[in-house]
Image: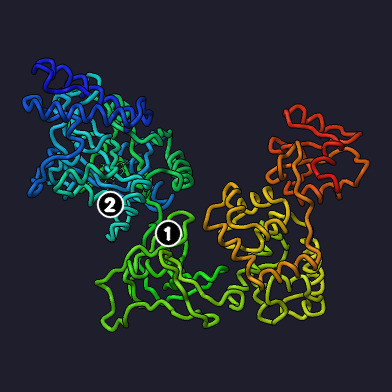
C-alpha cells in the first residue's frame, strides 16, 4: 500500500492514473469478458489504494473513477430526463404462425420475396437502460420510464461493474447512447433473498423485481452491494460518427468498446432460422445464468430497419417471441399436510388449476410452517404461482388486495399427525415439524416401504406406490420385513392384480434378497443416511454386525459421517423395534457378498459398467453377472465408450477387439474371481 502522505501531488496523480487503468481492466476482464486475470484480493487492494489517494488528494477526484463503483452520497430524489430519441417497446408474437406473419409483413413492405436476415437474441427479463457517452465518458444513465421521460440514475448505474465508465479503444462517435438491459443473474437473486430472509425481511418476488428495486435505491451504496449486470442490445442517439451497417456488427463494436453483449446472439438467414433458434433457446433456457422471457428477432440490415420504420411505440423491424408465462395468479383452495418417511410434515397447497410455465398446475409445495408464516397465506387467497423449468411449483406471494372479505383466520399448522394422531414435534433450531408416531404411523410406514423397495435400495420391480398403499391398507404388510412373508394367495386377491402380476411380484421380492450391504443400509431409511453415506459405512465397517455395534465415535471415523449422522445411526440401532425388523429381514434370507478390497474396482463396483464375453470356467456368465451386480456394477451386453471394464474369457472375439480399440481395461477370469472376493 502506498502511503499517500509520502507522495507529492504529481506523484499521486500518476499513481491514481495507473490504479484507475488497472481497476478498469480488472473490471472489464471479470464482468465483460468473464475471464479475470487477478484474484479478487488484488482488485480490493487496488481499490483501497485508490480510495485512500483520492481522499488525501481531493483535487484528483474524477467522475470516471472506478472508486464510484462503491456508491456515493445518497440522493433526495431522482431527476427526470427527456430521452433524445424515445425508448420504444417491442411487439409480441406467441406462436410460429404469428412469427411468419411478422416476416410476411416485412417482405410486403420491402416489396421483396427474398429471405430476410435476422439477428436473434434472448429477451432479458430486467430493466431497460439508456447510457449516454460524450467523448467516450459516461455522462448519464437513465431508466426507460414512459419511453419519452425516464429517471436519471447515473450514480447507481456507475456501481454496475459491467458498465464502462469510459469507453475502451478508439473510433467511437463523440455522442453515443448505448441501450441495454440491467438484470440480476439467478445466483445473485438467490443469494440476495437468502440474505434478506436471514435478516427477517420478505425478500424479492423474482430477479426482475429485485433488479428494479436495487436500481431504485436513492442510496447508491446499497445498489453497489447488489450483483447487477448490464448487457447492451442496441444504440440510441449517435452523433458525429458512424456505426457498422448491421445490427450484429454494431453489437460486436459495442463489445470492443467495453460492453457485455449476449453470447447467445446469432444471425440467421431467414424466418425459419428464427423458429429454430427459438426452440434451441427454449431448450437451454433453464441452464442460462439469468432469466429470459422470450426471444427478440431484429432485421439485421440497418438500411432495411430504416426503410421499415416504426408504428406507434414499436419498430416494424423487430418482434419478441414470448415464452409462456412462468408466473400466474390462482386461488389457494386448501392446504394438505403430508407425512413423509421420517415423519416430516410438509404442507402442500391445493390450487385452482392454472396454466403456468407451459403446464397446468394444481399443487404447489409450501415447504414448512415458517414458509406459511412468511407468506402470511390463508385459504381462499389469490396467490402468485411460479413454475420455472422442471422446478416444483412454488407460491411466491399473496395478492393481499384480493383477499376475500370473509376470509377465515390464518392457516394453523397441525399439532397432531393428520394420519395417526400422534403429537407433532419440532426440535429446537429445526424448521421441520415431525409426527412422533414413528413406525406406528401408517403414513410413515408406507413411505418407509416405498423407500425400501425403490430402485436404488432393494430394487423390487413392479412394487409401485399404489401397490404399497394397497398392501398396507389391506393389512398384508405393516413394515418392510413383512414384504418377505406375503403370500401369493393374498396378493392375487388384490384389486387390479392378476395371477401373472402376483407371480412376478413374488419373484421380484425373492430376487431382491441378493443385494449389497450398502444398498441394504440405504434401504433401511436411517435418517441422514443417503446412498453415499451407506456406501462409505459398508466400505469402512464391512459387516452389518460391526455397524450395529459401532459407537458414535467409531462412526465419526468414516468419511462423510458427522455428529448428526452418527447419532441417527446409533439411535436407529438402539431402537429395539428396528433391531427386530433387521433381524427378520436377515432371517428372511437377505444376503450380500462379503465386502472386501479388490484390486480392480476398489472397494465396491458401484458405478462400474462391465461387459462379460467369452467362456468362463468357474461359473456361468449369468452367475458372474448376478454377483457383479450385487457388488454394485452395471453389467451390459455391448462395449461402448461408457464401458469401464471388459471381462474376457477364452473365445472372446469382436467385443475384445472393440474394447482394445477404445482403450478400455480388459480383465480375465482370475481377476474376476478376485473382484468377487474369496468366497464368491
Ligand atoms: S430491443 C426498439 N433487445 O424488452 C427495440 N429489447 O418491450 C428496443 N429487452 O423493455 C428493444 N432484451 O428492455 C431489445 N435483446 C433485447 C432485449 C430487449 C430485453 C427488453 C427491453 C424492453 C422490452 C421490449
- Secondary structure under badge 1? loop
Mark 1 CB within 8 Å of ligand 1: no
Q: Are marks 2 and 1 in contact (CB under 8 Å)?
A: no
Q: Nearer the viewer, residue 280 or 576?
A: 576
For disc 1, the neighbor class at 10 Å (few under 14, some 14 to 19, many from 20) is many
Q: Residue at x 17, y 34 (%)?
A: 68
- x and y, in percent, of residue 539 in the image: 68, 48
Q: Nearer the viewer, residue 263 or 656?
A: 656
For ligand 1, give the image quadrant: top left
Quarter of the N terminus within the rendering: top left
Instruction: Spot the residue most to the right.
Output: 617
For disc 2, the neighbor class at 10 Å (few under 14, some 14 to 19, many from 20) is many
Mark 2 CB within 8 Å of ligand 1: no
Among the two numbered marks 2 and 1 on one chain, the one whose residue lies closer to the N terminus: 2
Q: Residue at x 43, y 79 (%)?
A: 414
Q: Which residue is mark 2?
A: 210
Q: Residue 54, which numbered label?
A: none
Amino acid at each position: 500500500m502506498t502511503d499517500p502522505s509520502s507522495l507529492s501531488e504529481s506523484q499521486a496523480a500518476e499513481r491514481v492514473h495507473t490504479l484507475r487503468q488497472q481497476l478498469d481492466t480488472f473490471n472489464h476482464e471479470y464482468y465483460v469478458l468473464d475471464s479475470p486475470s487477478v484474484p479478487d484480493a488484488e482488485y480490493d487492494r487496488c481499490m483501497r489504494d485508490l480510495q485512500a489517494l483520492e481522499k488525501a488528494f481531493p483535487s484528483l477526484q474524477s467522475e470516471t473513477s472506478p472508486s464510484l463503483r462503491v456508491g456515493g452520497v445518497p440522493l433526495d430524489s431522482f431527476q427526470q430526463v427527456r430521452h433524445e430519441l424515445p425508448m420504444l417497446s417491442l411487439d409480441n408474437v406467441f406462436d410460429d404462425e404469428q412469427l411468419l406473419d411478422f416476416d410476411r409483413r416485412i417482405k410486403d413492405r420491402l416489396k421483396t420475396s427474398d429471405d430476410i436476415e435476422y439477428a436473434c437474441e434472448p429477451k432479458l427479463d430486467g430493466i431497460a437502460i439508456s447510457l449516454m457517452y460524450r467523448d467516450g465518458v459516461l455522462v448519464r444513465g437513465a431508466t426507460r420510464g414512459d419511453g419519452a421521460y425516464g429517471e436519471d440514475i447515473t450514480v447507481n448505474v456507475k456501481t454496475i461493474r459491467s458498465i464502462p465508465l469510459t469507453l475502451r479503444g478508439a473510433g467511437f462517435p463523440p455522442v453515443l447512447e448505448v441501450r441495454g438491459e440491467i438484470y440480476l443473474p439467478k445466483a445473485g437473486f438467490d443469494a440476495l433473498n437468502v440474505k434478506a430472509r436471514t435478516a427477517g425481511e420478505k425478500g424479492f418476488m423474482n430477479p426482475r423485481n429485485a433488479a428494479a428495486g436495487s436500481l431504485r435505491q436513492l442510496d447508491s451504496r446499497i445498489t453497489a452491494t447488489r450483483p447487477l449486470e448490464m448487457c447492451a442490445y442496441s444504440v440510441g442517439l449517435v452523433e458525429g460518427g458512424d456505426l457498422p451497417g448491421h445490427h450484429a456488427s454494431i453489437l460486436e463494436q459495442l463489445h470492443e468498446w467495453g460492453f457485455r453483449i449476449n453470447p447467445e446472439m446469432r444471425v440467421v438467414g431467414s424466418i425459419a432460422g428464427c423458429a429454430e433458434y427459438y426452440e434451441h433457446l427454449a431448450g437451454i433456457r433453464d441452464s442460462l445464468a439469468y432469466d429470459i422471457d422470450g426471444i427478440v428477432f431484429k432485421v439485421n440490415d440497418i438500411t432495411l430497419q430504416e426503410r421499415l420504420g416504426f408504428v406507434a411505440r414499436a419498430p416494424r423491424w423487430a418482434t419478441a417471441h414470448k415464452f409462456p408465462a412462468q408466473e400466474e395468479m390462482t386461488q389457494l383452495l386448501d392446504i394438505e399436510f403430508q407425512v413423509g418417511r421420517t415423519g416430516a410434515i410438509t404442507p402442500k397447497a391445493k390450487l385452482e388449476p392454472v396454466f403456468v410455465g407451459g403446464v397446468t398446475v394444481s399443487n404447489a409445495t409450501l415447504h414448512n410452517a415458517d414458509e406459511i408464516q412468511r407468506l402470511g397465506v390463508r385459504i381462499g387467497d389469490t396467490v402468485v404461482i411460479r413454475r420455472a423449468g422442471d422446478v416444483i411449483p412454488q407460491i411466491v406471494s399473496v395478492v393481499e388486495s384480493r383477499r376475500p372479505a370473509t376470509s377465515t383466520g390464518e392457516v394453523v399448522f397441525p399439532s397432531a399427525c393428520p394420519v395417526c394422531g400422534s403429537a407433532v414435534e419440532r426440535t429446537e433450531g429445526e424448521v421441520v415439524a415431525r409426527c412422533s408416531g414413528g413406525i406406528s404411523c401408517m403414513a410413515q410406514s408406507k413411505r418407509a416401504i416405498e423407500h425400501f423397495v425403490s430402485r436404488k435400495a432393494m430394487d423390487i420391480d413392479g412394487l409401485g406406490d399404489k401397490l404399497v398403499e394397497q398392501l398396507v391398507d389391506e393389512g398384508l404388510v405393516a413394515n418392510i420385513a413383512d414384504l418377505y412373508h406375503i403370500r401369493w394367495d393374498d396378493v392375487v386377491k388384490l384389486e387390479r392384480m392378476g395371477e401373472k402380476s402376483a407371480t412376478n411380484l413374488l419373484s421380484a421380492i425373492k430376487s431382491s434378497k441378493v443385494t449389497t450391504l450398502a444398498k441394504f443400509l440405504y434401504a433401511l431409511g436411517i435418517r441422514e443416511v443417503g446412498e453415499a453415506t451407506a456406501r462409505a459405512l459398508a466400505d469402512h465397517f464391512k459387516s452389518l454386525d460391526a455397524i450395529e455395534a459401532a459407537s458414535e465415535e467409531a462412526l465419526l471415523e468414516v468419511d462423510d459421517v458427522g455428529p448428526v449422522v452418527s447419532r441417527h445411526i446409533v439411535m436407529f440401532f438402539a431402537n429395539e423395534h428396528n433391531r427386530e425388523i433387521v433381524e427378520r429381514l436377515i432371517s428372511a434370507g437377505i444376503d450380500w457378498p462379503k465386502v472386501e478390497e479388490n484390486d480392480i474396482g476398489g472397494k465396491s463396483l458401484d458405478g462400474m459398467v462391465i461387459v462379460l464375453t467369452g467362456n468362463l470356467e468357474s461359473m456361468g456368465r449369468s452367475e458372474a453377472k448376478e454377483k457383479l451386480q450385487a457388488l454394485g456394477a452395471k453389467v451390459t451386453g455391448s462395449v461402448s465408450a461408457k464401458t469401464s471394464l471388459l471381462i474376457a474369457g477364452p473365445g472372446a472375439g469382436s467385443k475384445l477387439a472393440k474394447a482394445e480399440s477404445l482403450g478400455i481395461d480388459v480383465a480375465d477370469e482370475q481377476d474376476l474371481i478376485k473382484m468377487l472376493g474369496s468366497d464368491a
